[in-house]
Image (cartoon, rainbow, N blue to C red):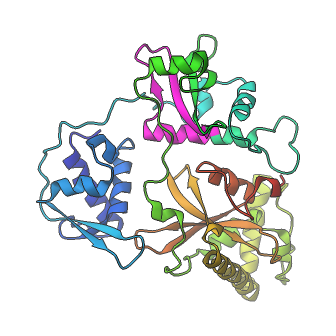
Amino acid sequence: MPDSLSTMIMTAFKKALAAEHDADALGKPVDICTLGQMLKSIDPTFSPHNYGEEKLKHLLQKFESTIEIKEDDSVYPSRYFATLTGSIPDEFATNTAPASFSHSTYDNIKRFAYILPQRYEELAGMALPEKWYFGSQPTPGRQYELLENYLNYTFIRLLHEGKILESASGMLAAFNTGLVDKKYEPIFALFEPNKNNQQKWFLRTFCIRGEGAEGKRLVREFSALPEAADYFSQPQDFIYDLHANPPSIDWDHIIIDNVDRIPIDFFNSLQMKTFVCKNCSKMSEEELNNYITELRAAFCEDRRAYRIAIALFKGAVEDTLKKVRWNYKTAIPMYYPRTRKINLLLPLCLVSDDKVDVALVVERTPSGQYQAHTILQLEWAYQNARLICRPDSDWLSSSLIEF
């Protein structure tokens, strides 16, 4: 962690304003949500809880002589802005984040620990009943593929938050899986030092606090139990704000760069003059790159077809926003591990009004407007959404998605 909280806050102000092409940290209001993101980027373990406060707003109010907090209640929920009015005294220099397990060498759970395949079946049996595969029937050997993905990316999120703990004896490591048993008690993963393989740890078992030998061992070894991953620091990111404009979209990226994610029937409907549409699902990387190059050239020659493609996408987005207005749950929050941000998934029906083809990924920007980043095939969309919670949706269901 940086030498002091005051240094972090000053740096966060400068980074936030630099992102908006304004280098002056004094006198310029910064959305507190943006400031929180910048603090996290400086120190991934940062949390107001480390300084005895529930929210960043309350922590910043301790600097009342140098930071001014204002509320904008013209929107719901209200937004708060912080303005730096002077240099921040270094009065919190001795406050540091609690010690946590060092994980800098790990980028996935299988580098961290050796995991026997049957452990996934064990976890699925302990947790609330859930279907951990796509389609109506599991593919042999892939009946827990969604659970494997969930556990891996939950692990990565916990690394980012500093919530994977090692006991004082060094003989046990643990984390909160984010899943619960039938009594809604949290399920913890327990690891012991690994003497037989390259990974430092091996996954011994899953347990419930205080239950059975391993659950009692967990309580004995850890004075504070590992916390679950937190995705809810900015609740406004979880509901699409219909007061904002429709999302801004880079059409070249969405339509051309992601051609392999769009149904071939969509391109066939354009009736392009000089281009023969092909199924991209079996193409090699080289074949796909050549195909994208040919498609881009064809659109340059046939601007009418490109205008029709954009119009169809815009129509699909407009229909989706009508559905969101009718039922806010249509927009599903997802966690994107690469950027460590919460985005929203919007279903797009491109070929038929009664079938969702892809999910449009949109992010709420500091201005409150939305930017579309990409489109995802539904299996990818589901896996990213499941990291937060099991989607309660009529369009994003593991049963409706076939590989």
Q: Position of residue 143 (x, y in %)?
A: 81, 38
Q: Which residues are magenta?
A: 151-179
Which of the 4 image quadrants contains residue 166? Answer: top left
The reply, left or right, for residue 76 in relation to residue 124 is left
Residue 264 included in the magenta stretch of the image: no
Which of the 4 image quadrants contains residue 274? Answer: bottom right
Measuring 70% from the left and 65% from the top, which residue is drawn there? 258
Farthest residue, direction front = 183
Residue 154 vs 316, above or below: the answer is: above
Residue 144 is at least partly visible in this image: yes
Residue 11 is at least partly visible in this image: no
Measuring 74% from the left and 54% from the top, which residue is drawn there? 379
Which of the 4 image quadrants contains residue 210? Answer: top right
Measuring 80% from the left and 52% from the top, which residue is drawn there? 284
Q: Position of residue 349 (x, y in %)?
A: 76, 74
The reply, left or right, for residue 364 in relation to residue 266 is left
Q: Position of residue 133 (x, y in %)?
A: 79, 45
The reply, left or right, for residue 73 in relation to residue 236 is left
Q: Nearer the viewer, residue 387 or 270?
A: 387
Residue 136 vs 356, above or below: the answer is: above
Q: Nearer the viewer, residue 263 or 354?
A: 354
Residue 152 included in the magenta stretch of the image: yes
Measuring 56% from the left and 16% from the top, which residue is drawn there? 192
